[in-house]
Amino acid sequence: MNLSLLDPFSLAQDYPETLTSELRSGHSTCIRFNRKGDLLASGRIDGAIVLFDVETNSLARILRGHVRQVQYFSWSNCGRYLLSASQDFRVIRWDLTKTGEEAMRAVRFVAPVYCAEFHPTNVDMFVAALYEDTPYLVDISSIKTLKLALPSGPLRRDPAAAEKHAASDSRHQTTACVFSSTGEYILSGNSKGWLNIISTETQKTVHSHSFTNSCITYIRLTNSGRNMVLNSADRIIRSVVLPEKILPDEIELEVEHKFQDVVNRLFWNHVMFSGNGEYVAASTYHNHDIYIWERSLGSLIKILEGPKEELGVCEWHPSRPLVAAVGLESGKIYIWATTNPQRWSALAPDFAEVEENVEYEEKEDEFDIQPVEDVKKRRLHLETETVDVVTIEPVRGEEVGGWQMPVSLLEEETESEEENVRIEGPRRTKPAEKKEGGEVKGGGARGR
Amino acid sequence: MTTPPTPNSSLPPRRTRFDQTSPPLRSTPSTTQESPPPVRPEYALKFTLKGHSAGISAVKFSPDGKWLATSCNPPPPLYAKLANRLTLTTAADSTLKIWHSLSGAHEHTLTGHQAGISDLSWSPDSLLLCSGSDDKTVRLWDTLSGKLWKTLKGHHNAVYCVSYSPRGTIIASGSYDEAVRLWDVRSGRCLKTLPAHSDPVSGVGFNRDGTIVVSCAHDGLIRIWDVGTGQCLRTMVEEGNVPVASVRFAPNGRYLLAGTLDSSVRLWDYVQGKTLKTYQDHRNEKWAVAADMCGSEDSDVFLWDVNSKEPAQILVGHEDVVLGCSAHPTEKVLATGGLDKTVKIWVDES
C-alpha cells in the first residue's frame, strides 16, 4: 500500500545495486525466502535452522533437529511448512505452528541428502535427491513413511540405443530434482547432463533431454513454473522455457539462453531467478561477485560487488529488489538492495522539487484577501464526496491470507543477543566470532 | 442541516438534531454498523467500570474482542510538560487494567511503569499489550499471565503514543522528544529513529498492511513514513498549523482520520493530500482525545456519520473529559474512558 506514495523512478529499479546489510547467526550454509517474502530460512553448519524476519532483520525462531550441515530448503506455498535436507541423512518437515518434537516429521535415508523439494500443493509429499543413491518420492501423509524410488537414467525411445547404453545409463545419478508447477511431473537432473521428466503418479520417466555432458548441479523454477534454469558443471547456466501443460509426447525443451563468462571461464556456485522471473543471478566459484543477467535478451546487466569472500547459496526476494547470499568462509548472510534518497518535497507539502528554474505564474485570486470564516464555510460545503472507509481494494502483488509467523514469547526459541548480530556498513569483528570458529572445525567439510 | 457550524461556536442544542431524517448512517470507522439500512446507532450505557484511581488515558478492545485494556494516567496526563508537573505521581497510579470486554469483569492489573501511561496498543494476536509511559519507556505485557515481558528503552522523554504493526513484529512509538521510534518486538531493539516532528508526537498508526506508518504532532503536521526505509513519503498540514492530537488510518487504509485541537476531526485522502470531510460540533482544544469515534471535552462521546458529517449519536454519561474510546471488533459495543476515572461500556442492542 505504500506503492501509491513512492517515487515511480525508485520503483522502476528492479534489481539491487549495493551491499546494504549483513545478517548473522552462527555459520550459515544455505538460505531460502518463503513465498511471501517475510521470512528467510538459514541453515547452519551445526544443523540448526534460523528463521529471520526480513522486515526487521531479527531472528524469529530457531529450529533444532539436524545434527549436521543443512543442505537445502523448500517452503510450502502457504508458508506454514518448511522442508530441510541435511548431511545427517535426514529430511525434516517442520510445521511452524507447533513447537518441540510435534513440529518435526523426520525421514531418514541411507545417504546424505542433496536436495528435497515440496510438492506444490501437497505438503505431505516431496522428492529427495541423495548423494550416490537412488532419488525418492516420499509420501508422509500417514504415520508410515512411503518411499518410492525414482529412475535416474534417461529414457531412450530407440530400443537398440537403450540396449547399447544400458550399462552406462545405470551409472547415472540424480543430482537435483524439483516438481513441475502443477505437481504432475518431477524434473530431475542427473550426473551426465540429462534432464528427465518423471510422472509423479507412475514414477516412470516420460521424457528425457540431454543438455550437456557434465553434471547438472541445480535446477530452479520461477514461481509461475514456466521458466527453469539449470546450473551445470560445464560452467554454463541454461534457461529453459517450459510449456504451460507438460505433454510428454509433444514436449520440446529448448535452451532459451546460455549464460556464461567466456573470458574468465567461471564456475557458478548457485543460480536463481528474480521474483518475477525477469532476471537470473548467479554466485561465482572462487570469486566474490554475483552476476545478474536479464532474461529477455540474455545480456549481463550488473555485477554485484561482494564482500571479500566467496559466496555460496544466493537468493532473490520474491517481491523486492533484494538479493541475499551466504559467505562461504564467515557464514554471514550478505544483503544487496536498492537505496533511494529521501525526496525533500515530501517533508514540506507546499514545496515541489523542480529540475531547473521555472517562471512562476501567479493565479488570478492567489493573494486576494477573503474573510477566514467564509473560506472555511466554502470548504466545508465542498466536502460532498462520498467516501468508503471500510471496503478493502486488493492491491497488486499483495498476497491475501497465508500463514503468518507469530511472535514467540518463549525465550528458548530465540537466542542471546551476541549470537544474532546484525552489522550495517563497515564490518566489525564481534566476540561471537571465536566461538563460531570452533564450530566450523567440528562441522566437517563444506558444501558439495 | 446544510450549514455546518463553525468551529469554536457555542454548541447548538444537540438533541433536537436527532429528529431529522438523513441518508444511511454508519458510525465512524468502527465496523459496528455493517448493515446499510438507515438505522441510527442506539448505544446505551451498560456498565461503568470503576477501579482506576486516576484519569483514564486510553481504552482499547483486543483484536479478538475478548478483552478490554485501559491505561491510567495521573493528572495532568498529556500536557504534563506544559503544566509544570504538579502531581505527586506514585507508581500505584500508573497501571494498566484488563477487563473482560462483554461482562466487564476485572482480569489483571499490570503494574510496573514508574509514571503515568499515555497510550496502549494490542498485538494482533491479542496476546501482548504494549504501553507507552511518561517514564520514557515502552513496555510489553503478556496478557495471559499479566506479567511484564519486555521494556523498550530509548526515548529521551515521555512516550505519548504507541501502535502495533498489523503483523505484530514492529511497534511504533511517538514521544515528547519529538521523534518516532520503530521497535523490533522480538529482540526489543530500536530499528529506526525517525526525526519526525518539531513538537511532541501525539499519535502514530500503521496502515492495514504495515508498510507505512503515520505520525502527527502538536506542530500541526501529519507525516507518512515508509516502514522499510524510514523515509518520509508525504506530509499534510492544515492551515494555521493547528496542533494535531491523534491520527489513525481508516479500516481499509485509504484515508486518514485526524483530530485537531481546533475542535475538528478531519478525514484526509493522503494520496492527494486533501481533506475530504470535516467533523465538528464537539469541543476539543486542549486534550488529545482518541479519534476513533471521538471523545469530547464537554464529557460526551460523539459518533458521526462518515458521509453526511452529522453526529449520529452523542453518548452522554461521563462527568469529565473523555480521552479514550474504542469500538469492539465484531459486536456493537463501545468503550470509553475519561478523566472521571471510570470506563463506560455502551451497547447497541437494537
Image (cartoon, helix red, strand yellow):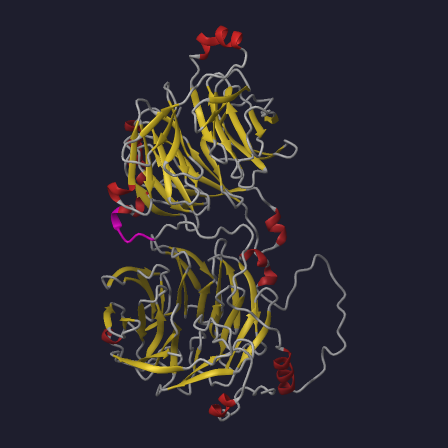
Q: Nearer the viewer, residue B316 or A66?
A: B316
Residue A336 place in picture, x, y as percent: 50, 41
Dominant secondary structure of the residues highlighted in magenta in the image = loop
**Looking at the image, is A301 positioned above or below residue B161?**
above
Chain part drawn in magenta: A407-412
How many marks overall?
A: 0
Which of A72 and A59 lies nearest the eye of the viewer?
Answer: A72
Residue A270 visible in the snapshot: no
- Quarter where residue A384 is shown: bottom right
- Choose between A161 and A300: the one closer to the eye: A161
Is residue A106 depicted above or below B237 in this figure? above
Residue under the point 36% across and 34% down: A84
> Is A410 included in the stretch rendered in magenta?
yes
Magenta region includes residue A296: no
Image quadrant where residue A86 sits: top left
Does any portion of residue B72 appear in the rendered image? yes
Q: Where on the picture, by quarter, is residue B72?
A: bottom left
Residue A51 screen position, x and y as percent: 36, 43
From the viewer's perspective, tell me whether residue B168 is left or right of residue A99.
right
Residue A414: % across, % down? 29, 47
Q: Quadrant of the C terminus of chain A?
A: top left
